[in-house]
Amino acid sequence: MIGTLSALLVAAAFDQQPWLDDFRQLTAAMSAHYANLDWAVEHRRMDLTKLRGSTEERLRAAKSDQEARAALQRFVDVFADGHLEIEWPKSASTDGSASPPGSLCARLGYKRPLSPGIDFSQLPAYTSLGGDPFPHGLLHLKRAFDLGVLRIAVFSEHAFPEACEDVARAMHLDVEASCEEDCSDAIERETANRLTAEIELRVRELRARGAKAILLDITHNGGGSNWIEAVPRALSHVALPEPRMAFLKHPHWTLQLEEKLRDVDADLKVGRGPRDVLEEAAERLRHGIAETREPCDRSEVWITGKIGCRMLVSDVLFAAGLLRHARPGAFAGLESRTTLFHPLRYTYSEKADRLPLYVLVDRHTWSAAEYFAALLQDNRAAMVVGELTGGAGCGYTNGGIPTVLPNSGAKVRMPDCVRLRKDGSDEVAGVTPDVLVPWANWESPFTKADKLLRQIRRNLDINNSR
């Protein structure tokens, strides 16, 4: 009886108002800088008025912080957006301060959180040819046709500390020395280039062993960094023009475009590079800067369910810069080289004699890995196999636009950009495979691999009969 009375007193004393204030702060932030809000309303036909009302009801009915927190988490989860997430404050650590990691690469954040993909070793038709950093082997499909398999677990150079250590040694860097922005940037770029070269080496090995095509396994690949821009170009037999990227009318993007314009203007001022390309780039950037400053109040969407104005600018940038495509090595010596086409930061080549590609995806393929699959699919450079991907699309630029809820202290991250597919759709809808593999959650590693093998063989039979 005493316990019940105590619980009732605690519930009666709980104040829901600070949590309601947090919720209003959250919806205001989403109105101002959630890049996929238009897509949620216009394509998913989400009823944001009803969602707001039901969330407020749950918050008013909450009897504890845990219940109020669950209500806000449920609200965020309904959007099913891989880049819309809420991070709750963690309790203070009681085990003292952790010792700083010892090696240079560890201090720079290089660690190895790699996930396994499809377990091809379960198949008698598979022969493994090597492991880390990119496990690879041959899958025998039919007479005189072997499929080379290459696993890419994540598209971030920071997930390959051994490659970073090799680069640091090659650069003769003292493991105890500090490594500021220019130093860490050089290590990051060279590590990415080393990894790209490693992927190319593995593909050449598979080809020499008799592979007639390459299956790139990016299941359970959560995304990565800008290194993703180089990898598909190092594998594709065709050039890969970039998709359009839309961005927000927001000061966050004003600053980014102004920085890009400074690089372009610097080259124009000294007469470096093709003047017509630079002048056209500068004009588009000025247009984009002006658009980011246009007022757009979408707060009424939570009341009326209607998007009152367009928050996205989609006629300025491509996903990797101001140009849709540039040849490897182009614009050497220009300050604006990577502003024009960011993949030029990396070393890669474009070749027409490469093997056909299959890209293997699943529901756990996210973000930059979706860009990889979409870029190859939209340019008819690969056939995508597997499941509909997770649906994260474009994420955060320059750290994103932070939002901290004042009562709970929760940090909310939301995407500030949108990558558009060739058909104009938002990549956040996920990448639909060309060849569907109907995997189920209950399946064992063997049944998943076996079902994939059957689908690939069936697809080859269909194509060969045409």
Image (cartoon, helix red, strand yellow):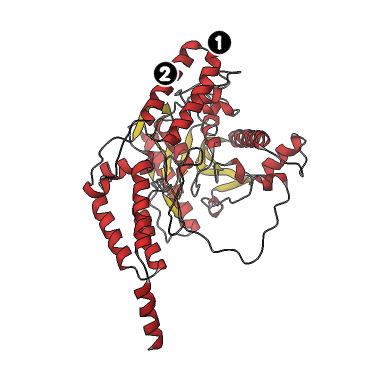
What amino acid type is highlighted by mark number 2? Glu
Q: Identify the mark nearer the N-term, 1 or 2.
A: 1
User: Disc number at residue 99?
Assistant: none
x, y percentage for residue 353? 53, 25
Could you tell me how far apart the alpha carbons at marks 1 and 2 are, in whole angstroms?
17 Å
Closer-to-camera residue (247/223) = 247
Identify the residue position indicated by label 1 in the image.
Answer: 271
Q: In this image, 1 relative to 233: left or right?
A: left
For the residue carrying disc 1, how many other residues have a C-alpha within 10 Å: few (<14), some (14-19), or many (20+)? few
| Secondary element at image label 1 | loop
What amino acid type is highlighted by mark number 1? Gly
x, y percentage for residue 184? 66, 37
Q: Which residue is drawn at 47% across and 60% down?
A: 444
Q: Residue at x 52, y 33 (%)?
A: 229
x, y percentage for residue 189? 63, 33
Q: In which quarter of the image is the C terminus?
A: top left
Identify the residue position indicated by label 2 in the image.
Answer: 283
x, y percentage for residue 431? 39, 41
Q: In which quarter of the image is the N terminus?
A: bottom left
Residue 128 shows up from this direction: yes
